[in-house]
Image: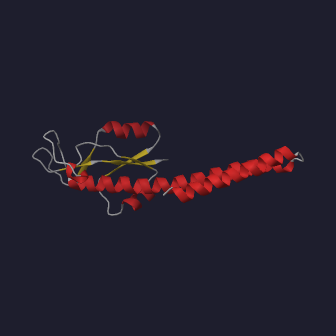
Amino acid sequence: MVIVALTGRRLGRTDKWPYSGAAALPYSYVDAVLRAGGQPVIVNDTRDPKDLLARVDALVLTGGPDVDPSRYGEAAHPSVYGVDSADDDFECALAEAALVRSVETAGRTVLFSALTVAISLAALLVFPLSFLRSFAYAGISVVALAATARFISAP
């Protein structure tokens, strides 16, 4: 079963909600994950976002109130609401860790795709026809060059 982390919002203690440390999000997110066959897990704080991402299969940043405009060098507008710097810190750290993980995964994907294509083209070498061997050598060279360029030029 796929475990999906859903970011929730911290709920403060009020006269209608006497608990502290609770997290909430619209149930439609939970329902969508369940209908897709996943297991939703609500998260709203962690010391190590990379460790959290290592324990789940997917991440959904559910959004909600506004991100503090000062985070990206802007002044607050009167329409800005619900700014919570702790939630912003958590979600930005999660997004950054997810981006790093995605780039690592993309690198493996490129490598295995390149190997698959190169091995497939190498099968042309078994035929005694010179033009097929030429295609094989040229194709393997192009795949090797493209994979090398990707690992040199991309992060």
Quick check: 94 left or right of 129?
Answer: left
Work out whether residue 88 can be spotted.
Answer: yes
Residue 30 position within the rendered picture, expressed as x and y whole percent measured from the top left? 36, 40
Residue 66 position within the rendered picture, expressed as x and y whole percent measured from the top left? 22, 44
Colour scheme in use: secondary structure
Give the camera-side residue of 9 and 34.
Answer: 9
Residue 73 position within the rendered picture, expressed as x and y whole percent measured from the top left? 22, 52
Q: In this view, which residue lies farthest toward the right?
A: 128
Question: Which corner quadrant of the image does residue 55 belong to?
Answer: bottom left
Quick check: 76 left or right of 112?
Answer: left
Q: Residue at x 11, y 48 (%)?
A: 14
Q: Residue at x 63, y 50 (%)?
A: 113
Quick check: 81 left or right of 49?
Answer: left
Q: Residue at x 51, y 55 (%)?
A: 154
Give the camera-side residue of 152 and 79.
Answer: 152
Q: In this view, which residue lies farthest toward the left?
A: 15
Residue 145 position within the rendered picture, expressed as x and y whole percent measured from the top left? 65, 54
Q: In this view, which residue lies farthest toward the bottom?
A: 47
Give the camera-side residue of 18 and 122.
Answer: 122
Work out whether residue 87 can be spotted.
Answer: no
Quick check: 154 left or right of 129?
Answer: left
Q: Residue at x 24, y 53 (%)?
A: 71
Give the camera-side residue of 96 and 41.
Answer: 96
The number of discs equals: 0
